[in-house]
Amino acid sequence: MERTVSTVPSGARGCAEHAATAAWARSATHCPHPHTGKNHPLRVGIIGGGPGGLYAAALLKRLDPGREVTVWERNPPDSTFGFGVVLSDETLGGIEHADPQVYEALQRHFTRWDDIDIVHRGERHTSGGHGFAALGRKRLLEILHTRCRELGVDLRFRTEAPEDLPRTHDLVIAADGVHSTTRETYADVFRPRVTTHRCRYIWLAADFPFDSFRFEIAETEHGVMQLHGYPYAPDASTVIVEMREEVWHAAGFDELGEAESIERCAKIFAEALRGRPLQSNNSTWTTFRTVVNDRWSHGNVVLLGDAAHTAHFSIGSGTKLAVEDALALAACLEECDSLPEALAAYEAERRPVVASTQRAARASLEWFENLALYLDQPPRQFAFNLLTRSRRVTHDNLRLRDARFTETVEREFGCPPGTPPMFTPFRLRGLTLRNRVVVSPMDMYSAADGVPGDFHLVHLGARALGGAGLVMTEMVCVSEEGRITPGCAGLYTGRQAEAWKRITNFVHERAPGTAIGVQLGHSGRKGSTKLMWEGMDEPLEEGNWPLVAPSALPYKGFSQTPRELSRAQLTDIREQFAASAVRAGRAGFDLLELHCAHGYLLSGFLSPLTNRRTDAYGGSLEKRLRFPLEVFDAVRNVWPGERPMTVRISATDWAEGGTTAEDAVEIARAFAAHGADAIDVSTGQVVADERPEFGRSYQTPFADRIRHTTGIPVIAVGAISSWDDVNSLILAGRTDLCALARPHLYDPHWTLHAAAEQGYTGPGATWPAPYRAGSRRPQTGRTDAPKPRLSLGSGDARGR
């Protein structure tokens, strides 16, 4: 559970405010009947008497007393699941504007607190300034029951909704929960996707109030377990006990009845519970299910709350989302001229908000699923990691909420006073980077005959002057046939090497303190294509060259089919990599990265989707690793011993049957055993039919997993676009370095500007002498200047 600093989107809150006031200034709203087209008071049937369904009923009736609104609930009025409900200030603001009476009733019963306590290995760490408000779920339902009856809503308990509601009513709101019968009835239209996760949990209660939100970790002989607890009344707290499925089985919970399970949980967390027993409400162990629907409405039937979407309880958004759904649906019905238009507007408004919340919830639940990875972190870093797990609470806003806590974490991490985590140095072999920012490899497609020219000098030189600790070249090809496009740069001739030396000399002379690295690769089956802006991944219309790959599989249906590499060709390509590495060393590069990601040649060997070989280089993961490791060894043998080598991998193919996160750990471990100094963790672009789960910092969990499973330093990439994200990821210990691409295209001086925006002028952010006059952030006359916006997308200019 967490409180975020995000606001309710203007649609949900703004429309609700407008609807709640403007609707009363005009005559009662009427809608065209979906069957007759004639105007008449809307007849609404609501399936499900949870908070979302009840609040929707009250809003719709309040906005138009002429509406006939009926709620069907199969259970008794006092039957509910769980105990306490947490609502954010943003949600309460929407309720206050839409129905002040409900808001006032809620206010009278709220329990409020500010602190979060994290208890791990006998130490308690407290972070303040968060601001929570909770009340009992039964009390919430009583308030909504009372309000519905005052307004004339027909509440029918212990009654199944009639099957013919869509025919007899103008609007049917399906608020019938995560196991929605309505959703399943129209599954072919809504197209639900339900994901079951790895932990078991049980909702319980304690007969006393915690004085904070409490996370407690128990390391038992069976595995790690966690308690989530918070007060919701002067004499009660919600307690959720959670653990991975295998721990649940090992501890024998699968063989215990309800009473025995509850007693066992009370003993495990006796200290947190002050020796008090736990209480049940027909509580059972369950597994969380994430619900996503392709559509939310069908004809005059619309989904609301958990029927449409779920978000893990650890960010406390289930009831919040349902109430905000009700606010948005009511507002859209007021603002739109027809029911189809209103339902379309409701979905268009709510879907992005819900998707964002579900991404945060997914990150949070996966953090708890993988909790065992973080147990050995320094105590306060562990606490910071937990608090920032969803990526919504960040270093910057946590510092605003509780500066003392955040400064303590920074000090234990090794940050000198006043130094943001991103400006601490990091050492790889004989190379010390002055800060944790990397300019990610970005294909520029601007070379002639593989030779980098003035464009590359300006492009890489500008970014080196911009303050990053490490600037990486684009993928530099090891042969003419290994190019992606005719515009790709290479290191297969002496002329190319001399051109690169001109660039490295500039960086070392004019941007002292910035390192420059080269990424070596071979296009494999993704070569012989047009320049990005002429048609990404499209074959050349003329001048094609033959392609080679682990197996004779084209990248796309219209792509050229590559030849399967013979043993002799494998030897030739290995030597091409080694020869290019020699040239890279002589050209003065400080670091070399081997490109084993994104479906290029070496990546093609690693993925079971692209490697169908039956010889010693295909089959098991060990065999698929063989050639990439041979290439790595050949390069490492000729690369100067004091200079580091990294490897970029795709940690998942985002496709069924492809590389998994578990595979990625073993791949990283194998390269590290052969001498890799860090793993650059990207994802995807291996097969054309991938389905990436895009979102803010969406690839960082893969880097995090590799780092904490293997201890290998990692570079995180993928939609990291604010300095706040970089600080958060570094301080939480999820990565060692952050590679950013598009932000550096937008602003070559991104790192130095990040320092200026944070008021930092120390080591790791030294401005070049000619630019020092611009080192202070210009005064705009505003005190509320916006922070850099986040952007989504792949990790570099073309996603290479």
Image (cartoon, grey):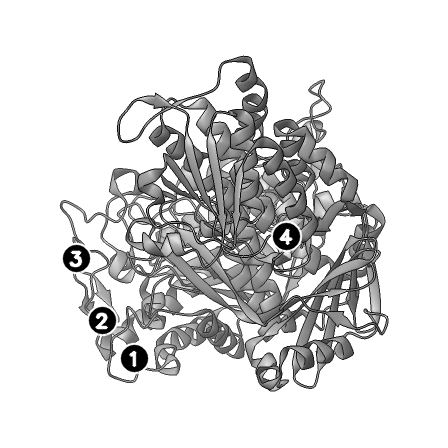
Disc 2: which residue = 551
Mark 1 or mark 4: whose residue is earlier in sequence: 4
Mark 3 or mark 1: whose residue is earlier in sequence: 3
Disc 1: which residue = 618
Asked if residue 435 shows in the view, the reply is no
Disc 4: which residue = 316
On the rendered structure, is 288 left or right of 242? left
Q: Are marks 1 and 4 in contact (CB under 8 Å)?
A: no
At x 69%, y 31%, the residue is: 101
Asked if residue 171 shows in the view, the reply is yes
Mark 3 or mark 2: whose residue is earlier in sequence: 2
Disc 3: which residue = 560
- CA gap, disc 4 and disc 3: 50 Å
Q: Nearer the viewer, mark 2 or mark 4?
A: 4
Q: Position of residue 564 (x, y in %)?
A: 20, 71
The one of 118 and 253 positioned closer to us in this rendering: 253
Q: Residues within 10 Å of mark 4 (few under 14, many from 20)?
A: some
Q: Residues within 10 Å of mark 2 (few under 14, many from 20)?
A: many
**Three-letter amino acid code at disc 2?**
Ser
Q: Are marks 4 and 3 in contact (CB under 8 Å)?
A: no
Q: Are marks 1 and 2 in contact (CB under 8 Å)?
A: yes
Looking at the image, residue 94 lies above or below residue 223: above
Q: Position of residue 698 (x, y in %)?
A: 50, 54
**Three-letter amino acid code at disc 1?**
Gly
